[in-house]
Image (cartoon, rainbow, N blue to C red):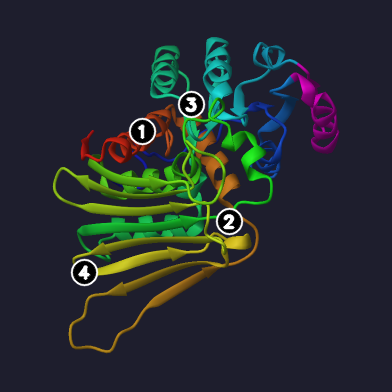
Amino acid sequence: MALGEGWTEPLPDGMITLNIGIIGVGLQGKRRASVFPTASGSKLLAAACGHPHHEDTVLRFSKSFGCDHHFKWKDLVSREDIDAVIVCTPPHLHAEMAMKAIDNGKHVLCEKPLARTVEEAEKMVRQAKDAGVVLKCGFNHRHHPGILQLRRWVDSGEIGEIDFARCVYGICGRPGYESEWRANQSYVGGGQLMEQGIHAIDLFRWFLGDLREVNAFTSTRYWKIHPLEDNAFVIFATEDGKLAGLHSSLTQWKNKFQFELSGHDGYATVEGLGGSYGTERASLARREFGKPFSEQILEYRGTDESWRNEWEEFEASVTNRRPPIGSGTDGLEAMKLVYAAYTSAEKKVTVKV
């Protein structure tokens, strides 16, 4: 349950520098590309569009970031001078692109959800293991400074044994959302729970361990995206009785992120993620019966550093030949839990994972 399973310091010769290719040149591709080269010595060599109708976009992208461009993503993954590929396309394209990159010996950082189906994700994880390359799922929330502070507080025993976790993660959508690819079931494996709630599920697993039982309710009340959901309430339980509760919403008219951990000796909370979610704050308080209530609060201002932090973790995992924090396996397990929640909601039963 520490910062990373098998985590080690970089090798004595320093970090490996990687030549990078990005597939997908939309908002997420730009976020990922913006960390180079300041995050490390790694270099963005090339970008490719994931769709043939995006040729103008990839030309602008390559000019903006000073890299080569490809109109066909298979040309990028076959380049011998590229060491790692970042996949920033809609989920229905993840598996084919990632596995083709792995076939060519590339390390892969693939956006969440890892794939559209559990079966696709299982193939990706198995293929990366067989090829001996790193496969990381894009769980940047693990790398937010507030969440990392919670990890340190938990690891140092500040709140004692964890009893429960709770998260509210909501966004308000935007006009025309029902026409976006995120609302197209042929592109995605689920609605808001798969889109954003999966981040919270990954964090639950990171702090509590494996989640074995799932009870869920989903609804589609405002956005015309049925059968995808715009709200989900889910309760998870571990084998030893730790509980986690999640509300994932697309009708949170003021964007909100709140992640809480409660233990025998106190609690720790992160509120906000910067930007439209408000200033990121990490809070710690201890159980002290009969004493005045007090709380330690840390605020993290400025730009979102999670993208840079996540990339540096990816580099460290390649350097040290170890699974990354937020591995392909973590991406697979989080997807299994999302689909278990959908089964629970549909059949109105508790699902054991």
- Say which of marks 4 and 3 sits in front: 3
Pick whichever of labels 4 and 3 is earlier in the sequence: 3
Magenta highlight range: 52-71
Q: Is residue 63 left or right of residue 121?
A: right
With respect to residue 17, does 281 lie above or below?
A: below
- Percent from the top left, x then y, of residue 262? 27, 64
Q: Amino acid at mark 4?
A: Asp
Q: Are marks 4 and 3 in contact (CB under 8 Å)?
A: no
Pick whichever of labels 2 and 4 is earlier in the sequence: 2
| Residue 109 in view of the camera | yes
Residue at 50% across, 38% down: 226
Check disc 4: other Cα within 10 Å, few if <14, some if 14-19, many if 20+: some
Q: Amino acid at mark 2?
A: Cys
State the SS at label 1: helix
- Percent from the top left, x then y, of residue 236? 26, 47
Q: Is residue 239 left or right of residue 293?
A: left
Residue at 25% across, 61% down: 157
Query: Which numbered circle lies on residue 115?
Result: 3
Q: Is residue 57 magenta?
A: yes
Q: Is residue 69 magenta?
A: yes
Q: Nearer the viewer, residue 4 or 9?
A: 4
Check disc 1: other Cα within 10 Å, few if <14, some if 14-19, many if 20+: some
Mark 2, residue position: 172
With respect to residue 105, does 266 lie above or below?
A: below
Mark 4, residue position: 265
